[in-house]
Structures are given as C-alpha cells and as structure tokens.
C-alpha cells in the first residue's frame, strides 16, 4: 500500500492552519481544479481567475478529503474537513517549503528554466531519472507562482530525485520560487526574445533567468547553454551565487559537447563528449532543439552522479506531450495526415524550431507541408519585426502553405510569397473552416501559436474531422 502523502496533522502544521473537521481517508495529492481532482486530493481554494472558494463543495463531491480555505469561508452542507488559513496561496507556499525540507539529504533536486524548452527538458530529465530512482516532477507546465508550490506540496518525502520547472513573465518572479525549491542543479536552457513587452532588453531577460541560481544549495551546479550569446552574463551570475558552472552545446569549449547529431523526422541519434567519457543515445522526439536540450539533461544526470548507461535509454522512448510537438497520424481518404501539435505556446525561437522540424518530414510519406500559425504574444514593440522575421525559417523548411490568424501574424502572412498563402483570419475560430477545406491525405500540418491565440481549437477541429489517429 502506498504511504499517504501527508498526515492531516502534519499538513495543518505546515500550512499554519486550523483543522475544522475530521479526515477519514488518506491524503494522496493536491488539486486546484475540481475538473481534474482525484479521490484523496486536498483541494486548495486559490483566488486566481476565479475564486476557488466557490468550488469547495464541488471538490468534496468529487472526492476531496479536505480543503485548504481562508478563515472567512462559511462551511456548506456536505463539506468535509477544512484547513482554515490566512490565505490559501501563502499556505500552499508554506506546505511546499515544508515538503522540500522533509526530503532526505541524499535526494537530488533539479530546477529548469529558460526562454524555450523548459517543459521538454523537464520531461526528458524526469524520464531518465525515473530509471535510476524514485522521481517526482511537475506535471504539464506548472511553473508559476502557484505551480511551483503545488508541485512541491505533491512531492513524496521518500523520493531520490525531484525535478521542478520555473517560469517567469517579469523580473523578480523566479527568485522566490527557486528559494522554495532550493535545487542542487539549476538548468537554463536558453535565453531568447520572449516577454519583451515586460523587459527593456533581452539582457534583462537573461538576468531574470539567472535568478534561478540564487536558490542553489551550497555547492550547487549551474548548467548553461554554451552556444547562447548571453552565456557570459549567465555564468557571471552563477559564479556570483557560488555555483559550479557546467556548459553544454556545440561549442568546442562546452563541458558537454555535441560531437554529432543525426536529426531525422522520427527522432535523432546523438553523440556527446563529456570531460571524462563519451556517450551515444537515441531520441524519439524529433527536432534539433530537442537534441540541444538533451545535452543539458546529460549534463544534469552526470552532475548528479546518475548512471548514464541506465538512464539515457529512456530518451528513446519519451514522446513529445500534447501541445508541445506531439505527432498523430490521422486516417484520411487516399493517404494519412500527419498532425504536429505545437499549440501550447510560441515565441520566435520555438516557432523557428517547430518550422525546422516540419521541414524534416519526408515528402515521400507526406508530400505537402502546411503551417498553421497564431500570434506570438508579449513581444512588445518588436512584435511586427519578429513575426516577419519568420520568413527565412518558412522558406528553409520548404513549407507549401501557411494559414495564419491574429493581428500580429498578419504581418508574416503578408510578407510570404503569394503561392504560400492559404488564408488569414482575425482569430483561430474564424480560421477553422478555411484551414479544414485545404486539408487532404498526404499533408503534414503543424499548428503553433501563443496560448492566448487558442490554437488548440484547430488541433481539435482536425482530429474531429479525421478521427481515429495513432
């Protein structure tokens, strides 16, 4: 039988709360959403887009064993045990800090940030570590002010490894989160022009990403992309924080150096040189950006003393998650359609990477390449230029047809050659019918845009039109 994640008394103490009621069942998790809540979860009534206190009773109906609520919450008929606190978010942070404190001194904790590739790197690292010891990691992209403490709270006390993803939109957001996580190893995948609307320069973004080093445990290691133009700035920040620096990339001076990479449409074969050995492994997820981030994973595994021979075969089995490059083959008249779902988010670097990956799809299997692109948001005054700047990537990938939506993506649409123009619409819903009318067997179609562009609607529309994918 799996041990409970928390006892109710320990949880109430960690939350600095008052217990109101009795918990009959074991606490096995935490949830902030009644739609995904499972039996045994503690429901945390956060005030975010909506006030979670409005859903406490629904949480108990869904199987919650307790709810973390403010002192002012009025108990409703059918409510179970309540832990009353000053503020549920602050209490969740305290629980997260307590969860980190109870880990074994031998446990190794990792934190991942970067403008691009955080979630994919976290997923690869989790898969590898899971082969060598009990591992806990963030789900999806739970990397913000509530996602990090929620992931910490969910961490079992007996894990050997824990992997946390930390994101930001503004300066100063990473510092409190990394100080909760207290990683032994901190990875910065890359620094790119993302969230420029909130920063005066890309150097400011680099400084914000470097905040992750401020939470490193004594003797901790910073893993930095040697190929990134902001590496010196990142390295200086890491050294100022007392970290050991390990670099990765193609550069001849990288500590984990790319020797060769055979990048194919169905994955890659990678050869790396470390200071003390060479390693070779296969990647199931396609893309040169995946290859680059896998080098960061190897660096982190090596720093942690993990058995690389045991851990790295996991990379040959790990597939891209939904919204982040997941590939689905759909049945269509004549021949199948390849759907590449990159709908979760977008910025100039990730957009170029996704277009490049689309360009590797073999034409003998899928003769027609279609890109469906939504606005890249939060780019500030540079937005028009950055959208137009995708033209070379589209040309290099030999894209046959581009569909676009949103006011910013219109700049790109008007800049590409007329024969490539499928259709433009003001939003994803208005683009749906135009896009579907052009899809037929033999297409490889990639869908990408910022989360606010709601490109996932188009992924669903294609799946609904061509059901039965594999």
Image (tube, rainbow, N blue to C red):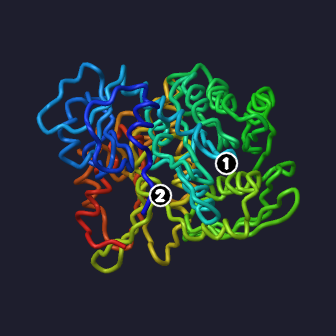
Decide: is 376 above or below 28. Answer: above
Q: Going by the image, does 208 lie left or right of 380?
A: right
Mark number displayed over residue 108? 1
Image quarter where the N terminus lies is: bottom left
Q: Please, what secondary structure does the residue beneath circle 1 have? A: strand
Say which quarter of the image contains residue 413.
Answer: top left
Instruction: Classify 10 Å Cα crowding around label 2: few (below 14), some (14-19), many (20 and above).
Output: many
Q: Please, what secondary structure does the residue beneath circle 2 have? A: loop
- Give percent across and percent down for residue 176: 57, 26
Q: Going by the image, does 222 lie left or right of 25?
A: right
Distance of label 2 from label 1 (alpha carbons): 29 Å
- At horizontal 43% and vertical 25% (from top left) the residue drawn is 16
Where is mark 2, residue-wise?
Answer: 325
- Give percent across and percent down for residue 134: 58, 59
Decide: is 440 above or below 67. Answer: below
- At horizontal 43% and vertical 33% (from top left) the residue drawn is 146
- Nearest the eye: 324 or 61: 61
Decide: is 103 above or below 354. Answer: above
Say which quarter of the image contains residue 326.
Answer: bottom left
Query: Could you tell me if the residues under marks 2 and 1 are in contact, i.e. CB atoms within 8 Å?
Result: no
- Give percent across and percent down for residue 114: 61, 39
């Amino acid at each position: 039988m799996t041990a409970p994640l928390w006892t109710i008394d320990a949880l109430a103490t960690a939350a600095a709360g008052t217990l109101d009621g009795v918990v009959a069942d074991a606490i096995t998790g935490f949830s902030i959403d009644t739609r995904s809540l499972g039996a045994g979860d503690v429901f945390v009534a956060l005030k975010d887009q909506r006030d979670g206190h409005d859903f406490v009773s629904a949480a108990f109906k869904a199987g919650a064993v307790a709810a973390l609520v403010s002192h002012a919450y009025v108990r409703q008929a059918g409510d179970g045990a309540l832990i009353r606190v000053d503020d549920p978010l602050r209490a969740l942070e305290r629980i997260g800090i307590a969860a980190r404190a109870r880990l074994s001194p031998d446990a190794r904790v990792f934190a991942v940030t970067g403008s691009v590739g955080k979630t994919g790197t976290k997923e690869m690292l989790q898969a590898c570590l899971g082969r060598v010891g009990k591992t806990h990691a963030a789900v999806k992209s739970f990397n913000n002010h509530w996602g990090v403490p929620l992931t910490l709270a969910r961490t079992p006390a007996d894990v050997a490894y824990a992997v946390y993803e930390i994101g930001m939109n503004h300066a100063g957001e990473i510092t409190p989160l990394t100080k909760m996580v207290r990683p032994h190893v901190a990875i910065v995948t890359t620094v790119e022009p993302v969230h420029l609307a909130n920063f005066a320069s890309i150097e400011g973004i680099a400084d914000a990403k470097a905040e992750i080093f401020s939470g490193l445990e004594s003797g901790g290691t910073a893993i930095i992309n040697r190929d990134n133009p902001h590496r010196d700035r990142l390295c200086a920040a890491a050294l100022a924080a007392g970290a050991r620096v390990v670099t990765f990339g193609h550069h001849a001076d990288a500590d984990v150096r790319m020797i060769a990479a055979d990048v194919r449409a169905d994955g890659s074969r990678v050869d790396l040189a470390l200071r003390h050995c060479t390693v070779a492994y296969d990647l199931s997820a396609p893309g040169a950006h995946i290859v680059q981030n896998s080098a960061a994973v190897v660096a982190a595994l090596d720093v942690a003393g993990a058995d690389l021979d045991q851990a790295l075969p996991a990379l040959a089995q790990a597939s891209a998650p939904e919204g982040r490059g997941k590939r689905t083959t759909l049945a269509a008249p004549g021949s199948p359609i390849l759907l590449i779902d990159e709908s979760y988010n977008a910025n100039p670097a990730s957009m170029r990477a996704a277009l490049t990956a689309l360009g590797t799809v073999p034409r003998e299997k899928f003769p027609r390449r279609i890109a469906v692109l939504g606005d890249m948001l939060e780019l500030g005054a540079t937005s028009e230029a950055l959208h137009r700047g995708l033209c070379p990537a589209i040309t290099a990938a030999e894209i046959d047809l581009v569909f676009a939506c949103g006011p910013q993506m219109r700049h790109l649409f008007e800049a590409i050659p007329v024969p490539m123009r499928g259709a433009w619409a003001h939003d994803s819903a208005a683009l749906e019918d135009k896009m579907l009318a052009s899809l037929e067997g033999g297409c490889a179609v990639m869908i990408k845009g910022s989360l606010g562009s709601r490109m996932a609607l188009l992924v669903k529309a294609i799946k609904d039109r061509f059901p039965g994918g594999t």
